Image (spheres, grey):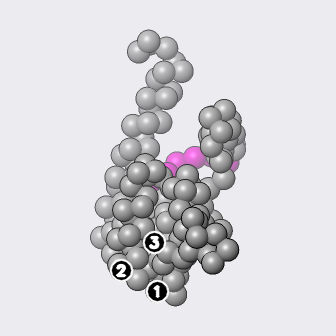
């Protein structure tokens, strides 16, 4: 198993993703005061508008169980609000607030620079296309949306 190049490819990307997310999260919070998970929520809400809580959870780089607790903390900070439409009292939507939009707008340039430093600048254009194709194929095979925030 360990000698199988497909397993090695999986392990290499899993290790890379874990290390990059740890570094990105630490730097995002240090430079902007906004944890990476909060940035992920805000970017999804700004790009897609209000989202049902379960749809938002599906989009996050976070376990589904942690999404509700995360949104609750962000609601306390005034960055998001939860709304229940009068037409469907069973549904709860997460909505970005003006304060959340301001925080995201300040964090985006930092986020883009950190991603470029840690990841993007190390790829050739054809490699970017390969990464996109591979991730889309794996996501689609599992029924996950292949699109990303923004």
- Decide: few, some or many residues near mark 2? Use Cα within 10 Å; few <14, some 14-19, many ≥20: few
- Residue 110 is labelled as 3
Which of the two residues, 115 or 68, is positioned nearer the viewer here?
68
Residue lying at 58% horizontally and 70% vertically, measured from the top left:
89
Q: Are marks 1 and 3 in contact (CB under 8 Å)?
A: no
Name which quarter of the figure residue 30 lies in. Answer: bottom left
Q: Where is the N terminus found, in terms of image quarters?
A: top left
Q: Position of residue 90 (x, y in %)?
A: 57, 65
Q: Position of residue 15 (x, y in %)?
A: 39, 37
In magenta segment, residue 124: yes
Between discs 1 and 2, the one toward the N terminus: 2
Residue lying at 48% horizontally and 78% vertically, measured from the top left:
81
Magenta stretch? 118-125
- Decide: few, some or many residues near mark 3? Use Cα within 10 Å; few <14, some 14-19, many ≥20: some
Between discs 1 and 3, the one toward the N terminus: 1
Q: Closer to the observer: label 2 or label 3? A: 2
The residue indicated by pointer 1 is: 99
- Residue 77 is labelled as 2
Label 1 vs label 3: CA separation? 18 Å
Which of the two residues, 117 or 79, is positioned nearer the viewer here?
79
Placement of 68 over or under 89, stated as above or below: above
Label 2 vs label 3: CA separation? 21 Å
């Amino acid at each position: 198993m360990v000698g199988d190049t497909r397993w090695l490819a999986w392990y290499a990307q899993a290790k890379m993703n874990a290390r990059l997310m740890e570094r990105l999260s630490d730097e995002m919070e240090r430079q902007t005061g906004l944890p990476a998970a909060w940035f992920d929520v805000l970017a999804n809400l700004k790009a897609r508008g209000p989202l049902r809580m379960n749809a938002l959870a599906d989009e996050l780089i976070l376990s589904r169980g942690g999404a509700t607790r995360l949104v609750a903390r962000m609601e306390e900070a005034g960055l998001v609000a939860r709304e229940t439409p009068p037409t469907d009292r069973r549904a709860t939507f997460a909505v970005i607030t003006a304060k959340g939009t301001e925080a995201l707008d300040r964090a985006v340039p930092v986020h883009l620079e950190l991603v470029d430093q840690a990841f993007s600048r190390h790829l050739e254009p054809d490699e970017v296309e390969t990464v996109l194709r591979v991730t889309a194929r794996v996501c689609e095979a599992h029924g996950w949306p292949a699109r990303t925030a923004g």
